[in-house]
Structure formats: C-alpha cells, structure tokens
Amino acid sequence: MLVESAASAFQVHASDNVATLLGEAATGAPLEIVGPAGRLDLTAREKIELGHKVALDAIPEGAPVVKFGIVIGIAMRSIEPGEWVHLHNCRSQLDERSGHFDVHTGEPGDNAYA
Amino acid sequence: MPDSAAGQISNRVSDRSWTGYLRPDGRKGIRNHLLVVYTVECASFVAQEIAKDESDTHVIGFPGCYDNDYAIRLMLALATHPNIGGVLAVGLGCEYTQPHRIAEAVRASGRPAESFFIQEHGGTRLSIAHGKELLASLRARAQENAVKVPMTWADLTIGAECGGSDGTSGLAGNPVVGRAFDRLVDRGGSAIFEEVVEMIGLRDLMISRAASPQAAQQLGATYDKMLNYCKAVRQYSVAPGNFAGGLTTIEEKSMGAFAKGGSRPIQGVIRVSERPPHLGLWLLDSVPDEHFMQFGYTNPNDTEGIMDLIAAGAQIVLFITGRGSVIGSAVAPLIKVTGNARTFRNMTEDMDFNAGRVLSGELTMDEAAAELMDLIADVAAGQPSKPERLGHREFFLMYKHQDVPSLEAGCRA
C-alpha cells in the first residue's frame, strides 16, 4: 500500500496548539511539524491545505486556540490532534461575524441580499 | 549552521559601519538625493519631466489645489529627510500650497532649495528647462555641502510595512523582520512599525510591551481610537481571501502583522510626520482624527504607509510581502522581504530577501535576522536595493487630518 507523501507544518511559538501547513496534506498523510518545540510527528485526519492550520493537541470545546503564543480564537467543539482547525470549529472572540463564513471560500453567509 | 558560524554572523553584524552624510540637524543620511516637490497635480508633469533621467532625483508632491496641514507636514518631513541634499519646489501658480514656503523651510534646515511657478516661466517646455538648470545648481551645492561621516546601527531608523500578505507573512516574513528590529534596537538604533488597524484584539499585548506608563497610556488610546475608526468605516481588516488562505480570525491576522514589531519595549506612539523623540522601538499611528474618520482612509495603499514611515525619519523601509509586490519608494530605499520561497523565485528581480528559508528549515529565525541585518548594512553602505536598481520611486499622498483640535477648526488647525 502506498503511504501518503509527508507534508510539513510550522509551529510559530512553543505554546501553540496549532501549526500552519507549508504544503497540502492529504487525509492520512504523515505531518512533520517544524518549530520551536522541535520536530513532532502527527497524521493529518483530513485534507488540509497550504496556509491552513492543524491541531497539535486535543483542544476541548470552549478552550483557546493558540498561535503566535496568543489566543486567536475559541474552539466551537472539541478538536482532535491532526484535525483541520478553521472557521467550522474555531471562532473569533471579537468579530461577531465569525462563525458565519463558508469554511472553504470564506464567503459570508449572514447577509440577506434581499 | 554550527554555533561558531552563527557567532561570526552576529559579530559581523555588530561591527558593521559605512559612510553616510551628516546633515545640519545632526541626523545622518545614507543617500544624497535631490527632491522635486510639486504643490498641485497641475504641476506634476513638469516636476516629473524635470527629474527624468536624473538618477539622483526623486519626485514627491500633493495633488490637491486646496491645501492640507497634514500633507504640508509630510512633504516638509520628506524634504528635510536625512537622505535629501537639496530641494526644488514647483507650483503651477493658482494653488493654496506655496512652493516658496517649502523652499524657505528647507533652507532653514541648512539645505539648498529653489522654487518657481510654471505660470511665471513660460509653460511646460521652458519650465522644464528652467527646472533642469536649477537642479544642476542644487546638485553642485548639495555635493559641496556633503559632509561624509562614519555611520553605524545607532545612526539608523528603519521602518517596516507589510502588504500583499499571505499565510507565510505572519509565519516567516514578519517575524524575521521583528527579530532584525530587536537586533537594531539592541545596537542603539530606532525601529518604527505601523498598521494599527491590524492590531485588533491585541490591546493587552500592546500595552504589555510599553516601555513606560506614558507609553502604555498612548498605546491604549491609539488602540481605542483605531477600534472606533474600524466601527465608523464599518470594517475589520480581514477579507474572504484571507479566510480562504487559511487565516481563521482577525486576531490571527493581526498577530501575524504585529510580529514585525519584534519583542522589545515600545517607547510610545508617534503621529505621521513626527520623529521618534528618542531611540528605540516606536509605533506609528496613521489613523485619521476622530472628527474626520469617515473622510480619510488610514492606509489606502502600501505606498502611503511606506511614506509615513519615511516621513518619521526612516532611512530604509523593510517591506514584507507574501504574494509579491513591485513597488519601491521615493526618498529612502525599500528592501523587499518575502516569507514565500515560491514568490522569491517567481519575482526574483524584485525580491531582496527570502525569509521562506526559515519555513523549510534551512535557516533559524535568528540566522535569517542576522543575514537580513547584513543586507540592511549593505544597502545603507550604498548597494542599491532591488527596487532601487529597477528605478522604483513610488510616492502617494492624499488629504488626511491628524492633530486637528475640532471639526470646526477644519483644515487649518
């Protein structure tokens, strides 16, 4: 059986619980996490694109999502290591429109257009 | 890289010195450019033609016929910038902004300056010829006046701006610039960053970086004004394209932008055309005054932000781009840094520094920052940056209102 080719992801700060993909990762692909905490091995639970984030740890619902060493959002449900972290499971603490954007295109869904 | 090699890089960086130009106000420039200033859009063609084929001559100006205190302050800050040796101000003859007043202010700074109105010099062709003659005389005097002195890090003020950002900017481009800022500040230089509208959610973090209680008060007030501005113009600085590129929240985008401020204490906040009152790291606030928030935009394009940084005295500006950009800047060289290795390859004639090597594991952040510092010293010593080599000298200025005490005081506070 072919093993999915590895992708790397970058962890900015040692306290971050997410890392950013430097290439596209297919479902089941091994991930090499580069950053201040050293190299970690992880498996992508789903397809994750370049520039998007993967969870490094289990993040419980309501817990902070940390990148750059700061809270960039709150987990809307529990997130497993290797999961894609984005608009569908992480919301802003400030932007009231957060939670209304299409997870793939970012298109806002909160305008009536009527 | 083995430790000994990294040590050599940091020693080399701390030892760098080069020759610059001492100005009468004590500041030192890394270039000895001439500047042509037009005082209304109607004079801009003649101004550009005067500067054409003059490799040391840059052009700035204000398009409006009605004058604006903010714009006059910015033009004077650039006309008396340490990289400038002499100034020619050119007007049409009907506008509010007065070329002779600009020339007087420049002469008061100890530089040669001339001015004239196109309507008094026979129109386009004769004005261009007259301007070329004045420029030759200004050049001779600027070279005669030039006092060459040794310069080092403590004599530098560097600005940082980002634009055309992608997922790599917050990961590599901005953090590498932040590390370079730390090194510059540690060596006694000054660093300035801006883009306050991209600090949403970072109020506490900004204040925690304050060098003094006064700086903390300024940072808090600047944040609050910016948030009111964002509400007044009804937008946050994040867009569907950012989401599609992997950024999930405005907090995430903001933190990526804030990374270019490095980690040293912030000494305080300066407004456009103010110089940092002392050495260290400073935040520049380009958000319009509250009374005028729905009237001017804080950062209509990258060039405006770059000019704000140069007006604060930056002799060099670092521009961080992920997707790629092809701008340069008048008055002070722009050094283009990208965190995206693919952009560096695709636009190699425009990109000065590939910070993407940090993401591939080729370099550590500190090694990249040391290498960037070396490049800054090379450019300070006279090596043209990529935009300079290509002849870029973009400039942008529009109406804005800062430091106006009331709506009634209007344009002439």
Image (cartoon, rainbow, N blue to C red):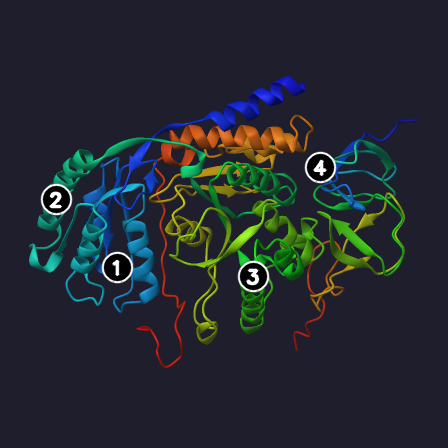
Of tags 3 and 2, which is closer to the observer? 3
Q: Secondary structure at mark 3?
A: helix
Q: Where is residue A43? Give x, y as percent.
A: 87, 37
Give amino acid for label 1.
Glu
- Mark 2 = which residue? B134
Viewport quadrant of the N terminus of chain B: top right
Label 3 vs label 2: CA separation? 45 Å
Q: Is residue B409 above or below residue B311?
A: below
Image-based side of B211 in relation to B411, left or right: right
Image-based side of B52 in relation to B267, left or right: left
Lower sequence index among marks 3 and 2 = 2
- Mark 3 = which residue? B219
Lower sequence index among marks 2 and 1 = 1
- Mark 4 = which residue? A22
Q: Tell me which chain the residue with mark 3 is part of.
A: B
Give amino acid for label 2.
Leu
Q: Is residue B16 above or below residue B222?
A: above
Same chain for labels 3 and 2? Say yes or no. yes
